[in-house]
Amino acid sequence: MQNKKRILIVGGVAGGASCAARLRRLCEKCEIVLFDKGEHVSFANCGLPYFVGNVIKEEDKLLVAKPQLFNDRFNIKVHTQHEVTAIDKLKKTISVTNLLTMQERIEPYDALVLATGARAIRPPLVGIDSPNIYSLRTIPDSHKLKAAAAKAKRAVIIGGGFIGLEMAENLAQLGLEVTIIEMATQVMPPLDEDMASYVKVCLEENNIQLQLGQAVESFKQTESGLEIHYSKSHMTTDMVLLAIGVLPESSLAKQAQLQLSERGAIQVNAQMQTSNASIWAVGDVVEVLDLVTQQRFSLPLAGPANRQGRICASSILQAFNPALDRKLSFKGVLGTAVCQVFGHTIAMTGASEKTLQRAGIIDYQAIYLHPGHHVGYFPGSQPIHIKLIFSKADGKILGVQAFGREGVARRVDVISMAMQLNGSVYDLEESELCYAPQFGAAKDPINMAGMIAGNNLRDDLPLADWDQLQTSEQQIIDVRSLAEFSSGHIPGAVNIPLEEMRQRIEELSPDKEVWLICGVGQRAYYAFRLLFQSGYKAKILSGGMQTYLAKYQN
């Protein structure tokens, strides 16, 4: 690097701040300047719902790094409330407006990083500009929400995804009556519907009203409150939070004629470089590769944004000096994510069945299991409801979704790491994990998931198709106890408890396939092994009655 290089960064939250700090760690001589149109940089936007709900009581806790820290510790100049309005690619300059003085100036660069993030979707509906309709992206947004919640008795959240659920919990704990309106027929649209049903029950048990499959059409301010009209119905509330997702904030990139995706995300290579060799981009504004489907999309998550910032810094310095050995690559994403709702955890990684089907991937199998998060004999064991999806061809793991009170994120993290290493269900079978009675089991839920899937692939545990249950003419045998069977069962099922199967096996028709079910799947597996070795054709309904309830009754 012959001359002192000047690097400008637009946007200073996850990706931009991460890039700036690593640039300084690797290059003391570079001039690094960061611009952000907001009042804060490097703030914990994932903590905003909990600041609104007074779980996090001090705003200062959300400020991971203030401009003064960037200056004193890293010699990085940070200009907040400065909006970058244009890029001149040929002259390698940007136009910047000071939002306090409205003065404009031109800043030259050797390398430019766009970390402009995403903006909340605000559909052009009648009444959308009501002062009682809010979004949550910034710290000032959170102050407005806190003030509104302090005066409100009723709140409606439009959108039942991550932010919607976290805000529902926090507003409810502030004492508000909360309703979620969701256009999809389920909450948590990234989940498959059978797994989202656990979330639905959790919300309803905590007095969150749900309006699913409802599209909001308009708003109207009345004397009694803000009226929301949706799908031929309406309700009145005191405040509304829009939580229907985000779009890449790529207006600068569009003005500079950088290559964008159909949804407006900036297209980058594995080094986070855009279609212009002197401009890089990171974070919510960029398009990323789905490692499962191999399709590109935008993913607004803090983890990938931080990693992209790090890779981007190395890429810039490599471009300045090709002799450096600093070429890092961003491989793609699995969408590993977690959310807490009323003491329960929802976590996922990889593809759902819905995602696979949209991508045209059909050669997969899904299994369900409901193990305790640690051994049952140790006090406090809580069930984890797990759905594991894998390739029928080779057992490659395609995705997992889990819900429960304890141990959920840990299991999904383990499977995410296995997927990043191109792992299969056979690897899960042999995973060596921490074990003590208060933490897990000698056969951890990870091992159990791998064993069930592996047994299926070896034809030691053939699975019936849940989707054919209501039209199937097979004989359905429930191997639970009579008391369990009497408390609720699949219509048309016949009860033969596992302990009586050997004595009553002749009650089964040898010419008709047997579908076996129990509480969670274990006893049905034992019954299958007995029937299979006795010459019967049989299959198991994966996950048992627990999964049946999730699929058809929740």
Image (cartoon, rainbow, N blue to C red):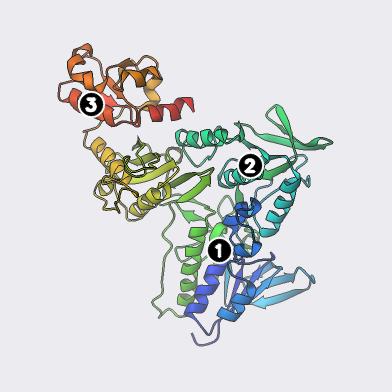
Given the image, on which type of amino acid does mark 3 rest?
A: Phe
| Number of residues whose C-alpha sits closer than 10 Å to that of mark 1, classed few (under 14), some (14–19) or many (20 or more) | many
| Number of residues whose C-alpha sits closer than 10 Å to that of mark 2, classed few (under 14), some (14–19) or many (20 or more) | many
Q: Residue at x 76, y 37 (%)?
A: 219
Foreground pick, 473 / 142: 142
Given the image, on which type of amino acid does mark 2 rest?
A: Ala
Q: Position of residue 114 (x, y in %)?
A: 59, 66
Question: Which label belongs to residue 172?
Answer: 2
Point out the tag, 2 or 3, that comes first from the N-terminus.
Answer: 2
Foreground pick, 527 / 79: 527
Residue 397, relative to residue 507: is it above or below?
Answer: below
Q: Secondary structure at mark 1?
A: helix
Q: Position of residue 535 (x, y in %)?
A: 15, 21
Q: CA distance from mark 1 to mark 2?
A: 29 Å
Given the image, on which type of amino acid does mark 1 rest?
A: Ala
Figure quadrant of residue 536: top left
Figure quadrant of residue 89: bottom right
Q: Which residue is mark 3?
A: 528
* Discs 3/1, front: 3
Point out the tag, 3 or 1, that comes first from the N-terminus.
Answer: 1
Q: Which residue is mark 1?
A: 14
| Number of residues whose C-alpha sits closer than 10 Å to that of mark 3, classed few (under 14), some (14–19) or many (20 or more) | many
Q: Position of residue 356 (x, y in %)?
A: 42, 40
Q: Secondary structure at mark 2?
A: helix
